[in-house]
Structure formats: C-alpha cells, structure tokens
C-alpha cells in the first residue's frame, strides 16, 4: 500500500508537469529527484499515471524539460481552441485551419520517420524553409477533400487555402502582413516558443530570419498524428536536402 | 569479409563528405572571401571542441559556444579580413556539420549479379553532431561517427590505437624527438577523450533504455578493453613523465621546452584517463540500477490502486500543513492560468476540424396574402356536429353557456375528443360575445357549426359559469332580438337540463348570482 507521502509526491510531480515554467534542476529542486523516481520506481510510475488518469491527464513521457502530460479529450484539461489565441480570435475558420496545417507540417518536417520520434536529436526549423516545404506538399494534400477522416479533410481545406496565399506579403511599415505563407510559419513557430515547445537557436540563424529548435515537449506530443494521411504526405515530401542550402542560409548566402 | 571492410571504409569516406561539401560548395556560394579561411580545419576543430566538452564533466556544449569558439579561430585565420565575417564563417561551418539536425544521407550501390537487370541501393544515414534539447537550451553532442572522424576516420579499435600511440610516444622520447612526441601525446589524449565520450553515451542510453544497449557482448567487451587500456595508459603516462623529467635534466634548453610541453600534455591525458576510469568503475552500478528499475522491479500493486484507500485516505490523514502545501501547489499549477497541456495530436484535431457546413435554406418570405394559420383549421366532423346540435337550441330561445356545456358533456360519448367539444362550445360562445351583433364567425368551421352560430350573440349577466373545466362569468347565447327581451337572463340554467353524469349541476342550481364573462379554463 502506498503511503501518504507517495500520494503527495505523485501530486507534486503532476503539479510540476503542469507548470510549463518548471524545469528539472531549476528553481524546483525536487523535480529532478521526482523524475528520477518516476523513471526508476515502477510502483511510483504507475501511481503517478493513476492519479493523472483520475485528473483527466495522460502521461506521455519525460524529456529534458520534465514530465510531459496531455489533457484527455473529455477531462478538465481537454484541449480546445482557446489554446491558440490567434486562431481563437480570428473570425475566419481558414485561419484556424492554416494554423493546424502549419502545426502538423512542422511535426512532419522535423520528424518525418517514426525513428525520429525516439531520437533526442532534433531538426532546426526555419520559417522560410518550412513554408516552402508545405507548399511542395500542399497540392497532394488537397486531394484529401473527400476523406472520411476529419483531420485529413480539414488539412485538405487548409492546403487549398495555403495555395491561395502569396509566399510573402510585406507590410507597409516593414514586417509581414498576416495573409501570406511566411507569416503563418513565423507566427506558429513564435507561438511554439511561447508554449515552451520550441526555442530560437541564435547560432543557426541566417540573415533571412531566426532558426528554431523543437523541444522534447513537442516531440513527445507527436504520436497518433503520424497515422493521418496528411502527415504521411508531408513526411514523404523532400526537404531541401542539399546541406549547402542550410549552410548558405546560415552564412547569409544564397539560401 | 572484404566486402564488409570495403563498406566500412566507404562509410568513413562518406563521413568526410560534409567537410568537403563545406569547403567546395558551401564556401564558394557564401558571401565572404572563403579562400582566406581553412574551413576543413575549422570543421575538425569544431568536432574537437564538441568532443572535448562531451568527454568533460559538463558533457555538452551549446551551439552559441561553438560559434563563439569558431569565430575566434576564424579571426585568427584572417585577422586582416576587412569584412570581418568571422561569425558568418563559424555559422557556416557549424551548419554544414550539423546539417540543421537532419541526418546526412548517402547511398551504397550494391553490385548487380550477371543475370540481374537492376542494382539495389542501400541508404546510409549519419550525423556528425546532434542538436539535443537539454531542458535549459539547445546543446550539441558528437555522434559516434563524429568521434571516429575525429580520430582521423580510421577503422581501428580505439583502445589499441591509443596504446600504440603511447608506445610510439615512448619511442620518440627515447629518440629525442620531443616535438613529435608532444604531437603524439595530443593525439593519444584525443583518443582517450573519444573513448570517454563513447562510453558516456552508452551509459546514458542504458539509463534511458536498457534494451537499446548490448550489455551481453558489446558493452562488456568495451569496458574490458577500456579498463585494460586505462590501466596500461596510466602506467605508460608515468613512464613518459619519467622520460620527460630525464629530458629536462639534460640541460638542452630546446629539449627542456619540448619536454615541458610533453609533461603538460601527459598531465591533461592523465586527467582524461582518470575521468574515463571513473566512468568505467561506475558503469556496472549504472547497469545494475537500470536492470533493477527497468527489468526486475516487480509490477507494482499500483496497477490496482485503490484511490480511496491508497490515495485519498492517506492524503487526508496527512498533516494539515503538508496537505495544504500540496493542494496549494497543485491548484496553483493546475489552474487554467497554465497553458493547457496540449499535444500535436490533440491540437491538430481541434484546429483541423472541418468547419460546420451551415445548410441554411433560402429565407421564406411571408406572402402578405397568406398570413393565415397554416394549420388545418377544420374541426373533426363529430365535434362540429355535436356543437352545432347544442347551439341549435339557442335559435329557439336564449340558453346559458353552462347549460350548453352541460348538454355537450352529456353527448360527449358521441365524439372522439370530448375535451375538444367542451372547448369548442365555450370558445364559440365567447366568440359570439366578442363579435357582438355585427360579428363574424371565426370558429374555424365553415360547415354546420358556422351556420348555426350565424345570427347568434352572447351577453353576460353576472352569473357564475357552471362546469368542471371552465370558470368565470356565465353567458347567455341567443338571437339578438331574443336577448333584447327583459327576461332574456331568465334563460334556463343547468338545473333545467337533464341530469348530468357528475355533480356539477348541484351547485349551479343553488347559485343565482351575477353573470360574468367566461374567460379562463380551470
């Protein structure tokens, strides 16, 4: 039988997992110890999962940023459109769909193969290259308009809308207007940074904009989406394979 | 097999491609004077730098640190470059080695047999550096391939190579070739750093997933070799130090300087070997702990956790301070102020949900000429006939509504809907009251009832309506000329009606008050 201390520790670990600012070894000195116990003590691991299930949470795993949990579909932590404020605020369903397309494309761009999801190494994502990647796949995704799967059908609608966007639409005061592909990718990657799912890698930045690294918290959340046909199409879409392209981008060259 | 050896050498050749691509293609396209920079050297130094940190206690290094390090080196390569593109040179070098975190790809072409029409190509993927998420930021670590490259891409056993290097160093020292000896010492130290980095990776993998590491053959063999190597090397280091001290004592200044460099290198090598030895000593406990936690630990009873007995009761039994602390911490962190714990799966499902298609029919404009109630207004024939029969009495003389309703109730068994008959009688009488002498006939009937009601009017004389279902004032219904008569209100009451089935008439018989308007159904 578990002791009350175990219950406290389980609750404490979940509380830390829900605090996106908490990091193992950071200002929460017990986080690392609890994570170690979660990794090594099977009983404690199961207890945490049980408490999480009771709260409507699902434990995805642990990464460098700590324990990663997600909300069950019907629980108090269920994910809804409020998560993405820009999509929520927009009156157009197209904006929501485009955000979804860029999100699934980011996952496919960074983790095109199943094995990538088990590796701790990550891919650098640049907004311009991500936009070009989506454009290469969009035509094929639009063929899913009649799919029975809601997500695939939504992706097809989003891809259609994507192809109607100009690649770049400069604003009058500099910057970008939102009705362009590059704004969509930049906006989503910046949002991922705020959510703790990505970070800017200054050392890899080019003259055309920042470079981003997806975090383990993002990677651990990519599981079932790989079964979508839209994801498969994106995953089969070639990257700019020439490494020199990325090098040139980083060096401020032709990339 | 020769073919395996060829494939291994092919892999090594491929491993050098990123560096050649950097020097030949990327540099040519970059917008700085690439001829002034030795990019291959920078790439090798970058790998050196990463592996050195990987073998240290810190374990990893950030991309920013690598760029800073390479920028400083690039500056020293061309301090007079007026464009000062040193950071750019550094980023280009790192980007080519890292390949944006994606694996480098190459294809091994299998040779087709004589009778085969096609040849198979086998993909080979590798990374030299890995970009990993450390929680606090991006970190770089070298892959095994990079470590092999760092060791000059020679497909040899690492431990044997280092032992050989040290033996060469000893020969060189004995022959007085101190500078060559120093370079060999550097090479040997780097080999040791590679060993440490490789072993550290194995142990990290073991902690994460025991099954991902071959502890049956591979790791024990590696540990055995590494332990033999460390033991041998530490002994060799002591020998070299003794030889170097002899060189210092020769009185030759040049030889003394070279020997001091050798001593410094050997001290660094000893540090590396000491750390490697600690890793080796700690490897078995890491393995045992991983085995205990990942394999042997019994499945916990928590599979059948009783939330009440195992969780809630102990929680409530805990001290107030402790439970409050946990509750506050949990509430603080689990509140909606925290970002919802979304995943790509759940959020994609929300964002890509197809918009609901609103199947709005075209607006149906009202035709001013067709504003009538679309419902069928006709009464059932039996109800209409019974009501007409009742109101027919009014043409002979004024009749009270109470009486008419009582008569209708008596005939209720003849209709399918007695309640409807009751309503029709009361409402038709009320309609006659409202319409007055000039009123139309809006009973909804165009048949017998319409005909009977034509010419009838109703008045109220202050008496109470009798009956079980309606209340209010009674009405007297009759032709206008009849109601004009002073004795019109003496119309028969329910008392004059044939006996009713219920007791509703008894009270009416005694009541002779004011006539009031019928209005409300009880």
Image (tube, rainbow, N blue to C red):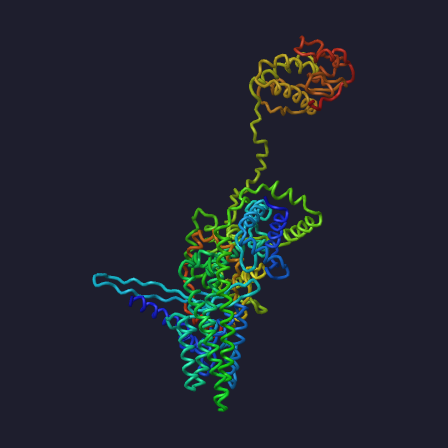
Residue B387 in sight from this viewpoint = yes
Q: Residue furthest bottom?
A: B252
Q: Position of residue B432 (x, y in %)?
A: 68, 22
The percent coordinates of residue B83 (x first, y second) are 52, 82
Q: Is residue B215 above or below residue B174?
A: above
How many marks the image carries: the answer is 0
Judge whether B223 appears above or below B166 on screen: above
Find residue A30 and report its horizontal and vertical position in percent: 62, 57
Quadrant in which the N terminus of chain B is drawn? bottom left
Residue A150 as seen in the image, left or right of residue B322: left
Residue B226: quarter of image: bottom left
Q: Quadrant of the C terminus of chain B?
A: top right
- Observer-nearest residue: B459 or B279? B279
Give the residue displayed 52% in from the left and 68% down from the top: B60
Q: Is residue B404 above or below residue A83?
A: above
- In the image, B458: left or right of A163? right
Residue A128: in sight, yes or no? Answer: no
In the displayed structure image, the side of residue A149 where residue A10 appears, left or right: right
Q: Residue at x 64, y 16 (%)?
A: B391
* Residue that extends furthest to the right in the rendered view of this protein: B513
Question: Residue drawn 33% across and 66% down?
Answer: B108
Front position in the image: B281 or B433: B281
Foreground residue among B424 and B483: B424
User: Height in image: B466 above or below B214?
Assistant: above
Relative image position of residue B84 (x, y in whole percent): 53, 81
């Amino acid at each position: 039988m578990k002791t009350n201390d175990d219950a406290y520790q389980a609750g404490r670990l979940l509380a830390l997992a829900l605090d996106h600012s908490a990091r193992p070894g950071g200002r929460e000195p017990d986080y690392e110890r609890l994570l170690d116990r979660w990794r090594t003590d099977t009983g404690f691991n199961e207890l945490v999962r049980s408490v999480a299930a009771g709260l409507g949470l699902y434990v995805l795993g642990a990464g460098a940023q700590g324990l990663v949990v997600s909300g069950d579909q019907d629980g108090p932590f269920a994910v809804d459109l409020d998560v993405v404020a820009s999509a929520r605020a927009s009156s157009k369903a197209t904006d929501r769909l485009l955000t979804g397309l860029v999100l699934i494309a980011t996952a496919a761009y960074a983790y095109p193969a199943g094995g990538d999801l088990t590796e701790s190494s990550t891919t650098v994502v640049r907004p311009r290259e991500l936009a070009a990647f989506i454009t290469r796949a969009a035509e094929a995704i639009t063929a899913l308009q009649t799919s029975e799967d809601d997500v695939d059908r939504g992706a097809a609608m989003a891809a259609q809308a994507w192809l109607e966007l100009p690649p770049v639409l400069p604003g009058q005061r500099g910057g970008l207007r939102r009705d362009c592909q590059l704004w969509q990718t930049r906006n989503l990657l910046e949002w991922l940074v705020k959510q703790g799912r990505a970070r800017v890698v200054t050392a890899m930045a080019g003259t055309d904009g920042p470079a981003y690294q997806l975090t383990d918290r993002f990677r651990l959340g990519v599981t079932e989406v790989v079964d979508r046909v839209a994801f498969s199409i994106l995953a089969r879409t070639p990257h700019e394979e020439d490494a020199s392209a990325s090098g040139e981008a980083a060096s401020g060259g032709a990339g | 097999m020769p073919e395996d050896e060829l494939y291994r050498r092919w892999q090594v050749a491929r491993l050098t491609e990123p560096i050649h691509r950097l020097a030949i293609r990327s540099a040519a396209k970059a917008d700085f004077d690439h001829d002034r920079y030795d990019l291959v050297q920078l790439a090798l130094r970058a790998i050196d730098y990463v592996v050195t940190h990987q073998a240290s206690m810190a374990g990893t290094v950030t991309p920013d640190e690598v760029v800073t390090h390479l920028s400083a080196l690039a500056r020293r390569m061309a301090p007079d470059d007026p464009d000062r593109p040193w950071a750019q040179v550094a980023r280009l070098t790192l980007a080519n080695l890292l390949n944006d975190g994606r694996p480098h790809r190459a294809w091994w072409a299998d040779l087709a047999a004589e009778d085969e029409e096609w040849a198979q190509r086998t993909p080979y993927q590798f990374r030299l550096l890995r970009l990993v998420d450390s929680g606090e930021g991006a970190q770089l670590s070298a892959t095994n391939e990079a470590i092999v490259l760092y060791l000059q891409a020679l497909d040899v056993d690492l431990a044997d190579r280092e032992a050989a290097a040290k033996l060469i160093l000893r020969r060189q020292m004995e022959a007085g070739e101190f500078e060559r000896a120093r370079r060999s010492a550097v090479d040997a130290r780097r080999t040791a750093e590679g060993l440490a980095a490789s072993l550290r990776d194995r142990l990290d993998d073991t902690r994460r997933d025991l099954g991902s590491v071959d502890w049956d053959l591979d790791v024990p063999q590696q540990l055995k070799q590494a332990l033999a190597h460390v033991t041998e090397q530490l002994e060799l280091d002591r020998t070299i130090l003794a030889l170097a001290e002899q060189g210092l004592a020769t009185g030759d200044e040049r030889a003394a300087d070279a020997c001091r460099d050798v001593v410094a290198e050997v001290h660094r090598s000893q540090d590396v070997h000491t750390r490697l030895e600690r890793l080796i000593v700690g490897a078995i406990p890491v393995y045992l702990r991983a085995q205990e936690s990942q394999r042997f630990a019994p499945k916990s009873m928590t599979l059948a956790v009783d939330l009440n007995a195992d969780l809630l009761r102990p929680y409530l039994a805990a001290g107030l301070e402790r439970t409050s602390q946990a509750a506050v911490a949990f509430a603080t962190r689990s509140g909606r102020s925290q970002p919802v714990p979304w995943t790509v799966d759940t959020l994609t499902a929300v964002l890509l949900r197809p918009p609901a298609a609103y199947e709005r029919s075209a607006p149906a404009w009202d035709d001013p000429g067709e504003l009538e109630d679309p419902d069928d207004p006709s009464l059932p024939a039996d109800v209409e006939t019974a009501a007409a029969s009742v109101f027919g009495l009014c043409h002979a003389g004024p009749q009270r509504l109470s009486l008419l309703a009582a008569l209708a109730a008596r005939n209720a068994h003849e209709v399918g809907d007695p309640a409807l008959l009751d309503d029709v009688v009361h409402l038709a009488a009320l309609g006659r009251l409202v319409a007055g002498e000039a009123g139309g006939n809006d009973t909804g009937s165009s048949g017998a009832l319409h005909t009977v009601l034509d010419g009838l009017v109703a008045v109220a004389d202050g008496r109470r309506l009798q009956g079980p279902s309606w209340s209010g004032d009674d009405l007297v219904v009759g032709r206008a000329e009849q109601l004009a008569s002073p004795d019109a209100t003496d119309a028969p009451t329910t008392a004059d009606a044939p006996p009713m089935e219920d007791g509703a008439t008894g009270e009416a018989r005694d009541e002779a008050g004011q006539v009031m308007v019928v209005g409300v159904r009880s």
